Image (spheres, rainbow, N blue to C red):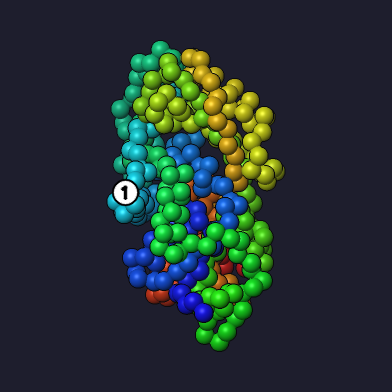
Amino acid sequence: MKKVDYIIVGCGLASIAFCEQLRVNNKSFVVFDNNSQKSSRVAAGLYNPVILKRFSEVWKAKEQLELALPLYDKIEKDLNIQINYKLRLLRRFTSIREQNKWFNASDKPSLEAFLSTRLVKNTNSEIDAPFGFGEVLYAGRLDTETLITSYKKFLNLNGYLQEITFQHDKVHFKTDSMQYENWKVSNIVFAEGFGINQNSYFSHLPLIGSKGEILTIKAPDLKIDYAIKSSVFVIPLGDDLYNVGSTYDNEDKSNVPTAIAKEELISKLKTFIKCNFEVVNHIAGIRPTVKDRRPLVGRHAKFQNLYVLNGLGTRGVMIAPYVAVKLFQFIENNLDLDTEIDINRFN
């Protein structure tokens, strides 16, 4: 019988952030992952502290960045990889009115650190932006594909990974622990993303799921080293490649890319990009979204050693380290969870 402090189910952004909490606190663990969930892998990875549609602050943006950026720096050093790319992010203005709204927002105490007050003029003939841009500070891109692939290799090399399906009905509850097959475990954390709907312990939670699709284009004449947010975002990847996204579909729950979404993204892109481009990749995944747009974190009402870490939605890169810390402190130090993320808000 193998004994561990934790089993973590899933290996996306939430799981990796929680594994890092366990590592720095010398807790033993094993991760079960069957590669069924794709939302973290297909995420564009763009992080920024501002909701650019209405120029408002992302929920707990400052606290999230203070935890996220050092964590990703640490993972880069530990795994000898590069995943965190600092990146200029420019919000394209469509009118003088939008410019004025931007500058009014930049005067707010919660936003002044994140919104530049300098109007950025467009100098690229392949971009239609007569009203210029506003620059978002403290933005960047996390290469989530490299992160997850490299982290799973690290887990596997160190005996922390089981690449098989976790079977929820095989958990047996003892007086002071649980048994799962040949594992004796103190706590189980479910970080399965949209897969939670197949989890008999937490499937009652209101995880909606929103399908997102992203294109990768090759545009040799575009020549930008910054990200643009307009009707869609454009994120440079190097070698004249750019990610373009994203769509939102609350009905289709498959990971299959669709022609309709591809057409939508291309149509929106052409409203402000003048040069020719070629679509070289098209991916889709289901984001774990919640109706109140807050994460799902907490303890099962009956089984006190079962926990959930989910519902990161569209901003998993920033939120994952924050909720991982909160859940670890809740389990190990009995610190209360924020009511905004505690699953008890739905009881």
| Secondary element at image label 1 | loop
Residue at 55 percent across and 24 percent down: it is: 279
Label 1 crowd bin: few (<14), some (14–19), many (20+), radius 10 Å: few
Q: Is residue 64 left or right of residue 181?
A: left
Counting from the top left corner in percent of width and height, residue 128 is at 46, 16
Q: Report if residue 207 is visible in the image.
A: yes
As drawn, the residue found furthest toward the top would be: 125
Counting from the top left corner in percent of width and height, residue 37 is at 58, 51
48 shown above or below 4: above
Residue at 55 percent across and 87 percent down: it is: 175
- Kind of residue indicated by mark 1: Asn
Q: Nearer the viewer, residue 302 or 97?
A: 302
Q: Nearer the viewer, residue 48 or 316?
A: 316
204 shown above or below 194: below
Q: Is residue 308 left or right of residue 113?
A: right
As drawn, the residue found furthest toward the right would be: 251
Residue at 32 percent across and 33 percent down: it is: 116
Residue at 62 percent across and 56 percent down: it is: 195
Counting from the top left corner in percent of width and height, residue 170 is at 64, 73
197 shown above or below 210: below
| Residue where numbered disc 1 is placed | 80
Q: Is residue 70 left or right of residue 259?
A: left
